[in-house]
Image (spheres, rainbow, N blue to C red):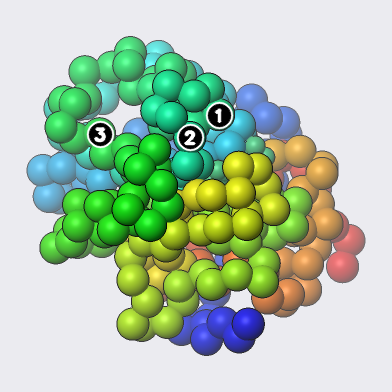
Amino acid sequence: MLHAMQTQQVCRWHILANPDALAQDATAHILQAGEQAIARAGAFHLVLAGGSTPRRIYRALTRSTADWSRWHVWFGDERCLPPADPERNSRMALDAWLDQVPIPPGQIHPIPAELGAVAAAQAYAETLAGRGDFDLVLLGLGEDGHTASLFPGQDWGTGAAAGDVLAVFDAPKPPPERVSLSARRLAAAREVIFLVSGTGKQPAVADWQAGAEIPAAAIAPASGVDILLDFPLPEN
Ligand code: 6PG
């Protein structure tokens, strides 16, 4: 499958000493982005990453002070599981952070993935319709170079005509059925930060740096992307 990359991705690599340092750096950046967005536009629209890496960050946000009444929380992807399933990305974020701070419930937008991928993608696209660019998008990186639920060999939604939300089937990372914002919609953001923890991700980072066509490399916001790592860059 060819992925018509819209714009060349600009990467800024940041090496942190360990997972705690990565979490502290990311948390400080998220809080600062929130303050700036609220000062600029009266609201902060943040897209959360799934997987396990962000948990440490979400817990740190729980211990932080912010004008939570102005925060709007979106999800970059979701697994087609019941809402209470501990493997749901929304469940992890709610348990680690969102249930502990006073963000108005109407400003937290889980993907209704329990509806099934097609119905949930349609519903989330309707929820997103007419919304502008996100202020900050958080993303993870899989060992195969996937990000959100955009996987190698599948449609990443990179073209200008790509929809906002994709139904994903046969995902190699369980569960197979998922919902994901498209590469195009994830890049429609003022800032994009990748959170990459654990040396198991080094081969994917090496591929990324070598210019491989991996899903993470398809996220190309105008402002470039910041990639936080807690291991050294591979020797090139
Ligand atoms: C998911 C995530 C996925 C994740 C990466 C990294 O639903 O699994 O959205 O893209 O961010 O696979 O996962 P870890 O942080 O657990 O390594």
Q: Looking at the figure, which quarter contains the C terminus?
A: bottom right
In the picture shown, does residue 75 fall above or below 55?
A: below
Mark in front: 2 vs 3: 2
Dot 2 and dot 1 residues touching (CB under 8 Å): yes
Residue 64 to residue 119: above or below: above
For the residues marked 2 and 1, what is the alpha-carbon distance in whole angstroms? 8 Å
In this picture, is 66 found above or below 212? above
Q: Which of marks 1 and 3 is in front?
A: 1
State the image coordinates of residue 193 (x, y, percent, origin top left): 50, 51
List x then y, in percent, for residue 216: 60, 63
Of the image marks 1 and 3, the number of the one nearer the N terminus = 1
Where does ligand 1 appear, by image quarter? top right
At which x and y percent is residue 44? Answer: 23, 43
Instruction: Name the residue furthest left.
Output: 42
Q: What type is the residue that disc 1 sits on? A: Glu
Label placed on residue 108? 3
Which quadrant of the figure has residue 11? Answer: bottom right
Query: Tag 1 or tag 2, which sits nearer the N-term?
Result: 2
Q: Mark 2 points at which residue?
A: 81
